[in-house]
């Protein structure tokens, strides 16, 4: 959890950019990403220097070579710890003319930490702004991994609060809920084919650190965690940079965050590779058949991105692989052949496990569309027995554009510090979802009037359209209302009419 002073420091950095003429929140976070990356390169080089000095050996993996760069500047001057002390205009010259070309060169060489820096540019020309931001970043105490990660998450939250760019961020508590539902394991191979800022991958990494700390003491598992476990794809280079930095600052050394148009490119190399998929892909509408990956069209013939993404998930998952993904409600009850085909596959060819209906305000203020979390396992031989439905009514925040927190921090999210009362549950259903998911045997006993219940696969198949909308199966409990006998009501009306008539006669007598 970030302290108040650190939040204030970040707010001041953000305000410095705005007053310095950089007002697009995505540009701000991109420039901060570059500067944090530059700072991290110096930290890595310093660590290698200390290691070499302690062991009395040559530096094994230097980042800054000895000597001068192609323009004649000593590489030593390109290090954060050195140029941060330079005069303002000199700092600007070094960073703009030497540090950024060095970053781009790292990207061209394919360095693991420079992969997404091929087109890195300093996005402003104000020397005072650069000096101010460098000084402010240098003053933030980011020595430990948790603080680094929280600082970056807080910065990313500013994208979400600034308008249209919020589409890149799924609310953190919804991500955490999905991760806890899937409970990643140390041997998993985790993928998000629409990674954005890598929120799902970051949350999965944090869950593993908290739940399986022994994993990082095992050399093989630690190597898998840092180099082979996490895979994220996006076709926006800015998002790739931000996502890669998010992973790095959360302590994953070398994740596979790479450029890919997931719906347009063939997936032969990745087919059946991943054991866990976590995603909330963008649903932009329709694609042309000629720009859509042919292997996805073989799964389902459609132009709709929401259906193509479900086909993609099935394509990427290995047999036995699990997925928790967000889909718009249309996927659950759409009437086209492609909609029905996808649902039939999930129910009859694989193992559909759960549909968690989200309240329509979860993604406000950016989208009011109704969505659901769909959980399934790829089997290719069926296996759906009962499907668990949960009607989430509250996620701990108001469902209007403000998304105000309805409970104290310690009562929010899927795993609050203390158990919630019934009144608090009405404001935050997430802990209840996790608890019920952990005891599905008990769910079979619940009536369909409850907030959650089981529906046998045969009932879903019997609809003829494999309808997965919760309202199709939820039963509304009507309270029985007792009415008086009609004869008694008529008699009562007659008495009232007689009283009115007497009153009118009396009034006429008084007036006459």
Image: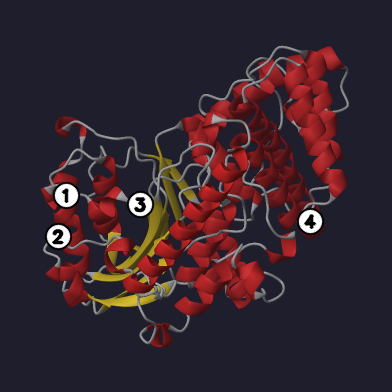
Dot 2 crowding, Cα within 10 Å, few <14, some 14–19, many 20+: some
Image-quadrant location for residue 134 = top right
User: Is residue 415 visible in the rendered structure shown here?
Assistant: no
Check disc 3 and report the residue beneath it.
Answer: 327
Q: Quadrant of the N terminus?
A: bottom right
Check disc 4 and report the residue beneath it.
Answer: 56
Say which label, 2 or 3, has the lower sequence index: 3
Tell me whether the residue at label 2 lies in contact with that at label 1, contact meaning CB atoms closer than 8 angstroms: yes
User: Which mark, residue 465?
Assistant: 2
Instruction: Choose mark 1 or mark 4, whichever is in front.
Output: 1
- Residues 361 and 383: in front is 361
Tell me whether the residue at label 1 lies in contact with that at label 3, contact meaning CB atoms closer than 8 angstroms: no
Tell me whether the residue at label 2 lies in contact with that at label 4, contact meaning CB atoms closer than 8 angstroms: no
Instruction: Choose mark 1 or mark 3, whichever is in front.
Output: 1
Residue shown at the point (56%, 48%) measured from the top left:
399
Q: Height in image: 156 above or below 377?
A: above
Q: Position of residue 41 (x, y in %)?
A: 68, 40
Image-quadrant location for residue 166 = top right
Dot 4 crowding, Cα within 10 Å, few <14, some 14–19, many 20+: few
User: Is residue 267 visible in the rendered structure shown here?
Assistant: yes
Image-quadrant location for residue 157 = top right
Residue shown at the point (71%, 72%) measured from the top left:
417
Check disc 1 and report the residue beneath it.
Answer: 335
């Amino acid at each position: 959890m970030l302290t108040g002073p650190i939040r204030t420091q970040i707010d001041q950095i953000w305000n410095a950019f705005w007053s310095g003429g950089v007002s697009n929140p995505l540009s701000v976070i991109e420039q901060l990403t570059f500067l944090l990356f530059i700072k991290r390169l110096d930290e890595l080089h310093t660590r290698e220097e200390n290691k070499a000095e302690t062991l009395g050996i040559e530096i094994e993996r230097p980042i800054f070579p000895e000597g001068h760069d192609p323009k004649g500047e000593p590489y030593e001057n390109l290090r954060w710890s050195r140029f941060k002390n330079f005069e303002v205009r000199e700092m600007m010259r070094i960073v703009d003319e030497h540090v950024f070309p060095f970053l781009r060169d790292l990207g061209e060489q394919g360095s693991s930490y420079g992969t997404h820096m091929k087109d890195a540019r300093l996005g402003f020309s104000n020397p005072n702004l650069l000096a101010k931001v460098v000084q402010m970043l240098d003053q933030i105490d980011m020595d430990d991994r948790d603080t680094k990660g929280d600082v970056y998450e807080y910065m990313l939250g500013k994208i979400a609060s600034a308008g249209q760019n919020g589409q890149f961020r799924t609310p953190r508590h919804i991500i955490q809920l999905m991760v806890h539902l899937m409970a990643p394991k140390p041997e998993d191979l985790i993928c998000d084919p629409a990674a954005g800022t890598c929120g799902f991958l970051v949350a999965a990494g944090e869950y593993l650190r908290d739940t399986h700390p022994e994993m990082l003491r095992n050399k093989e598992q630690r190597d898998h965690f840092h180099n082979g476990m996490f895979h994220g794809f996006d076709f926006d280079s800015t998002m790739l940079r931000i996502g890669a930095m998010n992973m790095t600052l959360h302590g994953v050394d070398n994740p596979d965050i790479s450029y890919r148009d997931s719906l347009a490119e063939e997936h032969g190399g990745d087919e059946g590779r991943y054991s866990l998929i976590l995603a909330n892909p963008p649903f932009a509408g329709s694609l042309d058949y000629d720009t859509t990956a042919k292997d996805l069209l073989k799964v389902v013939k459609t132009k709709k991105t929401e259906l193509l993404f479900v086909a993609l998930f099935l394509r990427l998952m290995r047999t036995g692989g699990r997925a928790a993904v967000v889909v718009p409600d249309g996927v659950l009850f759409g009437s086209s052949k492609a909609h029905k085909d996808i649902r039939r596959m999930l129910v009859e060819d694989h193992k559909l496990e759960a549909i968690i209906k989200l309240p329509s305000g979860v993604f406000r203020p950016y989208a009011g569309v109704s969505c659901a979390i769909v959980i399934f396992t790829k089997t290719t031989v069926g296996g759906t027995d009962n499907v668990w439905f949960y009607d989430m009514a509250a996620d701990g925040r108001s469902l209007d554009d403000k998304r105000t927190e309805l409970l104290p921090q310690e009562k929010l999210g899927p795993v609050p510090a203390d158990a919630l009362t019934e009144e608090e549950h009405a404001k935050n259903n997430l802990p209840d979802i996790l608890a019920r998911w952990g005891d599905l045997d008990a769910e079979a006993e619940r009536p369909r009037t409850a907030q959650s219940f089981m529906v046998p696969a045969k009932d879903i198949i019997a609809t003829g359209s494999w309808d997965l909308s919760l309202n199709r199966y939820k039963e509304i409990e009507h309270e029985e209302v007792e009415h008086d006998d009609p004869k008694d009501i008529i008699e009562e009306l007659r008495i009232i009419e007689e009283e009115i008539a007497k009153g009118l006669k009396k009034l006429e007598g008084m007036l006459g």
